[in-house]
Amino acid sequence: MSDVPARDREVVAGAIFRGGRLLLAQRTSPPALAGRWELPGGKVEEFETPQAALARELREELAVEVRCGTRIGVDVQLSAGLVLRAYRAELVSGEPVALDHAQLAWVDAEELLSMDLVDNDRAWIPELLEELRAL
Ligand code: 9L3
Ligand code: MG
């Protein structure tokens, strides 16, 4: 038996900024979250870095290549052993398309405030707004 506590599994989400706007994606599942908006992303696999996971998730969900940047906003505890973290993501190639979401939206600061974001992602609104207003 080891005394080292297990580290939380991580869900990564990407904040892609372009031209003073932020990319949001509308979820299709699970039913409780369908229709609500999020920063796209998903679970880090075993033996995968968060940076590699973000690149993989955004490739799978948006058909783009991104470079994972710095963290933005707080850690969000999803459940015991599962933590959600947002990272800035820089578009390297491709134009985002909704492969896994109902639709995508590029929002400015005012629009961000009017979107029905999933509860977990609302924790990041202050930092996202600050970044949008600085652009
Ligand atoms: N989640 C919350 N906010 C986000 C993302 C990408 C994910 N911005 C939550 C929803 C699911 C879990 O994390 O409960 C795993 O995400 P996914 O694999 O269903 O996208
Ligand atoms: Mg996902």
Image (cartoon, helix red, strand yellow):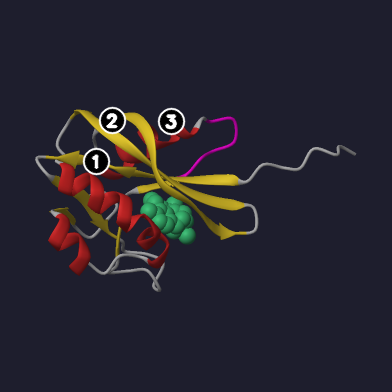
- Residue at disc 3, secondary structure: helix
What residue did someone put label 3 on?
51
Q: Residue at x 63, y 46 (%)?
A: 8
Q: CA distance from mark 2 to mark 1?
A: 9 Å
Residue type at the position of mark 1: Ile
Most extreme residue toward the bottom is 32
For this view, does 2 lie left or right of residue 111?
A: right
What residue did someone put label 2 on?
66
- Residue at disc 2, secondary structure: strand
Q: CA distance from mark 3 to mark 2?
A: 10 Å
For this view, does 37 lie left or right of residue 105?
A: right
Badge 2 crowding class, 10 Å Cα cut-off, few under 14, some 14 to 19, many 20 or more, is many
Q: Position of residue 101 (x, y in %)?
A: 27, 56
On-image quarter of the C terminus: top left
- Label at residue 109: none
Q: CA distance from mark 3 to mark 1?
A: 14 Å
Q: Is mark 1 within 8 Å of ligand 1?
A: no
Q: Is residue 101 magenta?
A: no
Residue 48, compared with residue 58, is above or below; it is above
Q: Position of residue 21 (x, y in %)?
A: 14, 47
Residue 14, compared with residue 55, is above or below; it is below
Q: Residue at x 33, y 69 (%)?
A: 34
- Label at residue 16: 1
In magenta, the rendered stretch is 43-48
For this view, does 80 lie left or right of residue 97?
A: right
On-image quarter of the N terminus: top right
